[in-house]
Amino acid sequence: MLVGCLFVLALSVAGCSSSKAHSFQFDANVFLADLNPTSQGVLGALYVTIVISVVAQALGVAIGVLAALGKMARITPFRVIANVYIWFFRGTPLLVQLTFFYFGFGAAHLWGWDDITIFGFFIPGALQAAMVILGVNEGAYMAEIIRAGIMAVDPGQTEAAKSLGMTYGQTMSRIVLPQAARVIIPPLGNEFNNMLKTTSLIFVLGVVETYDHYVILQGLNYRPFEAYAACALWFLLLTTIWGFIQSRIEVRFSRGTATGSSALPGPGWRTRIFGAAAGSTGLGGH
Amino acid sequence: MTAPNISTDLLGAIGGVPRPDVDVVVDARDVNKWFGRLHVLKDVSLRVKRQETVVVIGPSGSGKTTFIRCINHLEKIQSGRIFVNGHLIGYREAGGGKKLVEDKEKNIATQRQEIGMVFQRFNLFPHMTALENIIEAPIHVRGMAKDEAVAMGRALLERVGLAAKENVYPNQLSGGQQQRIAIARALAMKPALMLFDEPTSALDPEMIGEVLEVMKELAREGMTMIVVSHEMGFAREVANRVVMMDDGVVVEEGTPDQVFSAPKQDRTKAFLSKIL
């Protein structure tokens, strides 16, 4: 039903623009065919987008934790490494990082990105490069978010954990990070929303993900308007679904806070789409 | 006002008085500490025998809190030695015993298992229930089996009068209840020594009694305790000794009667006249 709403929205937008165009006729049949999830390659491309996003984000969080701890470390070399890493990956365009580390490193024989098979999954080199470079790039942004989260935890928590005989690792993993998570989760959700969309850049590596699928498609049928509209709609669907998942996760992680004792649900989908006051107009369709 | 349902036999929940083999639990010798240029502890020495309760009093800024924080190495010291159960805390000696080198973090963590600490602001873990707070360290630090830890945790909760609050998160508990759970949490590690850093200072007046009641019971049962507190009633009732600190120095020490009724030092007299 949600897809339906978005579809209607897209059609109306498309209708408006087509009326102003000179000799352009919006072809609904082409659009629907482009959008059709059962048409060849669409689901596969979406699958690639989702898998790469999840893996890259997970990698980004892991690297972000390390970089955040490195940035806060007492040992100077750790701090230097973390700072240089963050400086580089936040200071250069992702597109340049992707091409430099994939094509550049390949040409220089620094890293070949050979195809590998892990646990029975065949992972082509370009796909590896996409996941790793996106993840490493993301880690630089996550580092700041995670550091802010850790610093938001009362220092008394660390002292209490230490006084119970916990090591640094236990204190971080069992006491500080779970509490920091509360602060980290909302911006992390936004980062993942970004990640879903940013994966479209990896078409430069020749990975066929959602965007690249439609690039190829419009090259075949010469209908870029319909193809990219369908592409946008798929991304909109992904980020919208993620929005719902995100609000669930945020409720889950507010345990033990002032608002967390009662499981307050986030705003419903009506509120999210139409705003708080419009909920009563009731376009129906559960 | 007394706390509801505080039973006797608090230590029964953790299998009796821990470490009956040690005579002198704390032996601090000529401890010096600076915060930058500020000399906050000046040759502070203190011996605490097993099952003794020592109350440390003094004006704010006198170094009393800093001192007990040094005992479990939450603060570093620059010279002197602190032994707990005969082990040098936080450091190892180098250069023929002349220099102090900070110990490995892991060794310090091991030493802290023997030292329970109760904080002014409770510092319960907000993402864990009352019971989870108590069993966290026994399971993950001591390696206790979960069933065993839960049984002990429940026994402790019952004996601090909070059996019904097992699954409640700290933010739904009063300050007095939180502090009683914090005491139970520290006890669950079966420490040879308990440190209390102004445990009732952050409490509403009507909740002070219930926390003091638990502490008195602990003292009576023979837990070795160092308490930074201005609760004179508590000190008179259960302290073996009262130590008066001012400006980083131990000014005077003696039985509660000696210190409160017949202080020898002018600084002690001046301080007592303000708080009594």
Image (cartoon, rainbow, N blue to C red):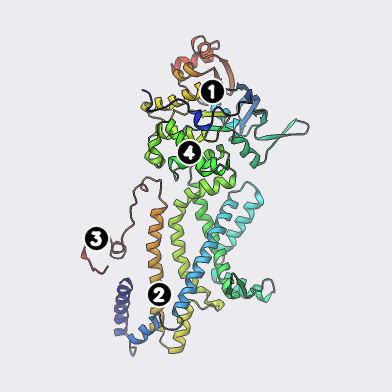
Callout 2 and callout 4 share a chain: no
Q: Earlier in the sequence, mark 1 or mark 4?
A: 4
Q: Earlier in the sequence, mark 2 or mark 3?
A: 2
The local secondary structure at tag 1 comes to loop
Q: Distance of mark 1 from mark 2, alpha carbons?
A: 69 Å
To which chain does the residue with label 4 belong? B
Q: Residue at x 55, y 38 (%)?
A: A164
Q: Residue at x 54, y 49 (%)?
A: A173
Q: Residue at x 67, y 31 (%)?
A: B88
To which chain does the residue with label 3 belong? A
- In the displayed orientation, state which residue is furthest to the top: B262
Residue ID for mark 1: B222
**Would you place residue A16 above or below residue A168 in this image?**
below
Q: Residue at x 46, y 62 (%)?
A: A191
Q: Disc 3 residue type?
A: Ala
Q: Which mark is residue B151?
A: 4
Pick the front one: A145 or A178: A178
